[in-house]
Amino acid sequence: MLDILADHISPSPLREQLSSVFGSISFACWLILMVPQLVEQWRLKTVEGISPFFLLMWASGDVFNFLGAIWGGLLPEVILIAFWFLFADFGTLAFYFYISKYYDHAKHGKHGKLHHHHLNHSNTEVVESTPLNVPGDLEYGVLGDDSGIHHSNATDDHHNIDNHNHNHHHHHNERRKSSTIEDVVYEPERHSVFVRIVLPLLLVIAAGTFGSILSPNASVSSLTNGSSTATANDLVPQICGYLSAILYLTARFPQIYHNYKKQSTEGLSLLFFLLTMLGNITYSLQIFAYSTDPQYIMLNMSWLLGSAGTIVEDLIIVAQFYMYRNNHNL
């Protein structure tokens, strides 16, 4: 997602260091970006929350991003990052179709059978119980000797419920003690926003910052160096960059509409979109921190559009999480 700069652009050491830090944080975001969404789909065993058009358009943008990196003769690490995006896209789409085929279809079939069985069972109970029950006697609990039986059954039921709750509580406590990460994954609603959202974001920022300190020139070199044959006039890489930007910009619209139509964001990971925003913000800051030279900005305009331009759309999706927070339609 990076392209070639003019040779005369020479930023100060401070700007280089800032650009390196922002670039490392952005890379850390991209590295684990899809993980929260994949975990959410696996937890719910459904893909109904995410639009397939969103995934396909996002992946198409990454294809043109990869082609632009190859055609532009960028550094191997830049091409490697672009290839990682494609690999992550392939895994995400494969997982989407796997969940859709083996869980969503099975779930719909099972729900239909259960609903049919429930109706038949309810009708059978009504037919069998109607001649035996006297509404007045049941309402007031006056059934002569049978009242003791009902009282005993009620007591037993209450005792069984207490035992079940106790066992469930004991099992829940044991799982929380033995597997905190698993508990956060499978029961996120039981944990605070700090544990579910803020802490992962802080860890990503810390990892990116330390990565930049350990290799301070990595991000800068990928920004400033290309092959000897690459120039600002290379048309094909620029075309690929703008096509990639257009696909990134339009990919969110199917997801926004999908959420609006369902009036729900269930099945989506809020952390996924926050990581996307953080990655795009730090990527844009990486470019501006390095230089604000007009030629440099124009060289990177397509990549800026594809990153900074999507932030507003991601904010809309984040707002939908708040608007539809009490709706669970899946």
Image (cartoon, rainbow, N blue to C red):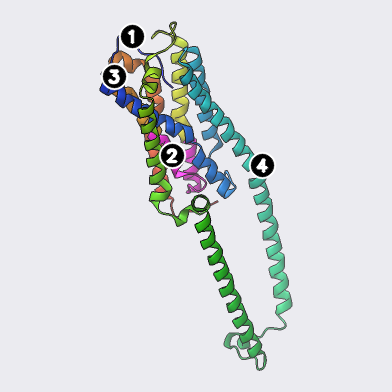
Start-end of magenta stretch? 253-278
Label 1 and label 3: CA atoms lie apart by 12 Å
Does any portion of residue 313 appear in the rendered image? no
Label 1 and label 2: CA atoms lie apart by 36 Å
Q: Which residue is mark 1?
A: 7
> Dots 3 and 2: beta carbons under 8 Å?
no
Q: Which mark is residue 291?
A: 3
What residue appears at the point 60 percent right and 38 percent down from the top-left corner? 95
Q: How many numbered marks appear?
A: 4
Amino acid type of disc 2? Phe
Q: Look at the image and say whether residue 29 sits in the magenta stretch.
A: no
Q: Would you say the magenta stretch is mainly helix, strand or loop?
A: helix
Question: Of the residues tagged 1 and 2, which is closer to the observer?
Answer: 1
Q: Which mark is residue 140?
A: none
For residue 184, above or below residue 88: below
Amino acid type of disc 4? Lys
Compare marks 4 and 1 and give the one earlier in the sequence. 1
> Dots 4 and 2: beta carbons under 8 Å?
no
> Dots 1 and 3: beta carbons under 8 Å?
no
Helix, strand or loop under label 1: loop
Q: Is residue 240 left or right of residue 290?
A: right
Q: Which residue is mark 4?
A: 101
Compare marks 3 and 2 and give the one earlier in the sequence. 2
Compare marks 1 and 2 and give the one earlier in the sequence. 1
Instruction: Locate residue 142: give its quadrant.
Output: bottom right
Q: Which residue is mark 2?
A: 273
